[in-house]
Amino acid sequence: MDLDALSGFKDPIAALDEEDADKAAAAEEQDARAKAEIVHIRVQQRNGRKCITTVQGLNQDLDLKRILKVIKKQHCCNGTVVDADAEGKNMGEVLQLQGDQRANVNKFLVDNELHPADKIKIHGHG
């Protein structure tokens, strides 16, 4: 009996487990990408009547500074690009605008085809 022939034996059940693990990993990656594709527009109350609008989840390939510059000029407000990774939140870069600019940002993103309307989530009351 040849012992070398036995050493090449593969467990068929273990192979199925590996395939399932690969499929599960691919599904998790796709879910993460789907969540990452959603843009969240929120308004946060500051002190008194002051509030800021944050835009999170935009594609990092976009030039966020140019987008911010256009929105600021169109809607007469100030704003900045904040790197939320530096704060340990792992959210990428976030746009912050003065005032409640949720409707304006939503309209801008849809009109300029930067993001589909069904993938934009607007939070807060208004």
Image: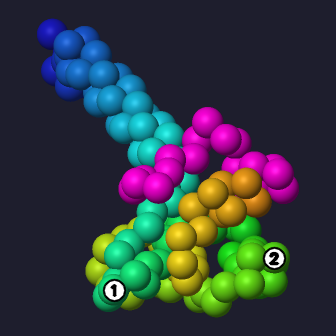
The spot of residue 59 in percent (x, y) is 63, 61
Q: Is 111 a magenta residue?
A: yes
Which quarter of the rendered picture does the N terminus lie within? top left
The magenta span reads: 109-126
The image quarter in which residue 69 lies: bottom right
Image position of 47 with respect to 12: above or below: below
> In the picture provided, is 61 more to the left or to the right than 16?
right
Seen from the viewer's position, the closer of residues 58 and 2 is 58
Q: Is residue 94 visible?
A: no
Instruction: From the image, state whether disc 1 or disc 2 is nearer to you.
Output: 1
Name the residue: 81% across, 76% down. 74
> In the picture provided, is 122 more to the left or to the right than 45?
right
From mark 1 to mark 2, how far is it between C-alphas? 25 Å
The spot of residue 43 in percent (x, y) is 44, 67
Mark 2 burial class by Cα count in 10 Å: few <14, some 14-19, many 20+:
few
Seen from the viewer's position, the closer of residues 46 and 23 is 46
Seen from the viewer's position, the closer of residues 117 and 17 is 117
Name the residue: 55% across, 83% down. 98
Q: Which mark is residue 74?
A: 2
The spot of residue 68 in percent (x, y) is 71, 79
- The residue identified by callout 1 is 48
Mark 1 burial class by Cα count in 10 Å: few <14, some 14-19, many 20+:
few
Name the residue: 75% across, 49% down. 110
Q: Earlier in the sequence, mark 1 or mark 2?
A: 1
Q: Count of labels shown?
A: 2
> In the picture provided, is 38 more to the left or to the right than 84?
right
Seen from the viewer's position, the closer of residues 22 and 101 is 101
Image position of 22 with respect to 113: above or below: above
The type of colouring in the image is: rainbow
Which amino acid, mark 1? Gly
The spot of residue 49 in percent (x, y) is 40, 82
Q: Which mark is residue 100?
A: none
